[in-house]
Amino acid sequence: MLYREAGQFKSSYAEDQQIFPIRQDRIAMGVLLAVAFVVLPLAGNEYWLSAILTPLLIFALAALGLNILTGYAGQLSLGTAAFMAVGAFMAYNFVLRMPWLGILPSFILAGLCAAAVGVVFGLPSLRIKGFYLAVATLACQFFVLWAIQRIGWFTNYSSSGVITAQQVVILGVPFDTPARKYLFTLTVVALMALAAKNLMRSETGRAFMAVRDMDVAASVIGIPMMKTKLLAFAISSFYCGVAGALHAFAYLGTVEPEAYSLELSFNILFMIVIGGAGSILGSFLGAAFITLFPIFLNLASDWLQNVTGIEIQHAVVSNLRVIIFGALIIFFLIVEPLGLARLWQITKEKLRLWPFPH
Amino acid sequence: MPTQVAFFVEVLAGGLLAGVMYALVALGFVLIYKASGVFNFAQGSMVFFAALTFVSLTERGWNFWLALAVTLVVMVVLGVVIERTVLRPLVNQPQITLFMATIGLTFVLEGLSQLIWGSQPHGLELGIADVPIDWLSQKLNINISQFDIFAAFVAGALVAVLAVFFQKTRIGRALRAVADDHQAALAVGIPLQHIWAIVWAVAGFVALVAGLMWGVRNGVQYALTFTALKALPVLLIGGFESIPGAIIGGLIIGATEKLAEVYVGPMFGGGIESWFAYVVALLFLLVRPEGLYGEKHIDRV
């Protein structure tokens, strides 16, 4: 009743090609953006903004990067955290060594460095496929972390190997409070998500999907394999690199290389699988799920202990949490292998008919 | 023998024998990938689970053989349960979904084993000390641990048993049929789901053996789960579908890794073992994209 496209006619190509062709979707998106940009920074408390929403957006951006590579171009990668590490440490070095550049150009250059690393480690994808490629990307994960830990230049020869990210200042405005850091992150993430959405609707995006669906067929119809695959690696790594820079500058502040371990790569892979591979929305839903679920589990276990009065050992709780997390991932894969984005789509289909049966 | 040469031989032999240990873990991956096309990331945590169960039982005063038998039963049951609860509902899903499910399984197994048996590290003794063989070190000045030799024999025996099992038994023939073609195997009446349960049980057995060997070497602790990461380059070189490939790959990785660690590592300030094996495997793949013995896939449009 409320959600249907009946009566909305399109009279120009531009109207036909807009991202949200249905008016209700546009209104919903506008409301969402207004809440995210205005209501949350004003109403949200510091803990929520700095410890939950900011990392959520950053991980969503990293998941978006991986989704471009894995979900759209079909190249499984286990090295996401390494690209984030490149972004984080290169952004630190650009700001440190070329302070006249400013923060945003430094972030872009850091992203480009990550893209270059991505292209180098994407080269094997021209020869190998599937799980062979996935395991090969682990080489990137381990090599990059090793290089950052061993080569002093990356950490400015700090003895502990830990860096402290500089303050974000744009046009003289310092982004120092949780609300400002959140707004900075949100702006970057929103713009890059928009760019990704449009890119995936373009010729490039369709070439990615053709490669994903069957690369031999794609090359037969004239899609250049090398250019497409390497471009997918480059764009994906650029997104991950910027996400890493944000992770260091807007969230962590003090960064050690170990923050970008294999575990983070797996977490981001979980985000796109649970959120929905090959979906921009899915990246955000997955990031929200993986970020919020451990917090929810913590609250639930605290609440259970309070209600029942049984003191459970800390080790037991943390092990149980790991078990539930793993079991839930398996459960999700069984129930909805296409992810939360697919659930959202089904809901919208149902809404179009509601309250009528047909 | 000149000390330089003796040292080289020692490093090489140590590397080859370490490679056998990697191959033991890689075998578990190969078995499951061969029969069900699942890239089982949980193999490392199965190794950990098996070793921890065994060592906890023996520490509670159980007889060695009884503990071994009970652990084996536990691993078989685990294999059947995994087939029932994880694989069966995910039949016909894309490979990445199954892969992600096994990562979820990794979390469950790691949490479960530490929940049941606690997270403190254990030592493990199998009656064979991890000390250099006397006459080798005296006569030739080469230090090779007798436990390494023992582990190599165990790995050899395991491969021989698996080879007989795969080639000569009825179940083994069914396994090979399933590995060749799921649908054709189903069509001639091979119960796919039983076969998968058997494969996971056999992989559990291999995990137990690997867990015991690694447990003696490094102690039974959480770090055992990382053995899986050591086994992955072995798979890349040997091919995901080949049992001999796992052994050969293990030897290649073990030898090059140890040699590089000793002769090349110091140039880079050490610590290169975390990635060196992967880079070797990567270069190898550029020449042979399916590994040494992996099946060639011919794409049809």
Image: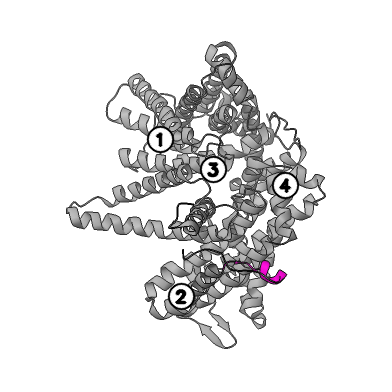
Of helix, strand and loop, which one carries label 2? helix
Between A239 and B207, which is closer to the camera in this rendering?
A: A239
Between A164 and B71, which is closer to the camera in this rendering?
A: B71
**Letter of the chain that mark 2 sits on in the rendering:** A
Q: Between disc 4 and disc 2, whose residue precedes?
A: 2
Q: Are marks 4 and 1 on the same chain?
A: no
Judge whether A65 appears above or below B287 on screen.
below
Distance from disc 1 to disc 2, alpha carbons, whole Å, reads: 47 Å
Residue at the location (59% across, 69% down)?
A8
- Is residue B140 visible in the rendered image? The answer is no
A16 inside magenta stretch: yes
Report the disc number at residue A124: 4
Of helix, strand and loop, which one carries label 4? helix
Q: Residues within 10 Å of mark 2 (few under 14, many from 20)?
A: some
Q: Which residues are magenta?
A: A12-22
Of tags 4 and 2, which is closer to the observer?
2
Q: Position of residue B256 (x, y in %)?
A: 67, 38
Report the disc number at residue A336: none
Report the disc number at residue B97: 3
- Residue type, mark 4 in image: Pro
Q: Do callouts 1 and 2 mark residues in contact (Cβ within 8 Å)? A: no
Distance from disc 3 to disc 1, alpha carbons, whole Å, reads: 23 Å
Residue at the location (41% across, 81% down)?
A42
Of tags 1 and 2, which is closer to the observer?
2
- Residue type, mark 2 in image: Val
Report the disc number at residue B49: 1
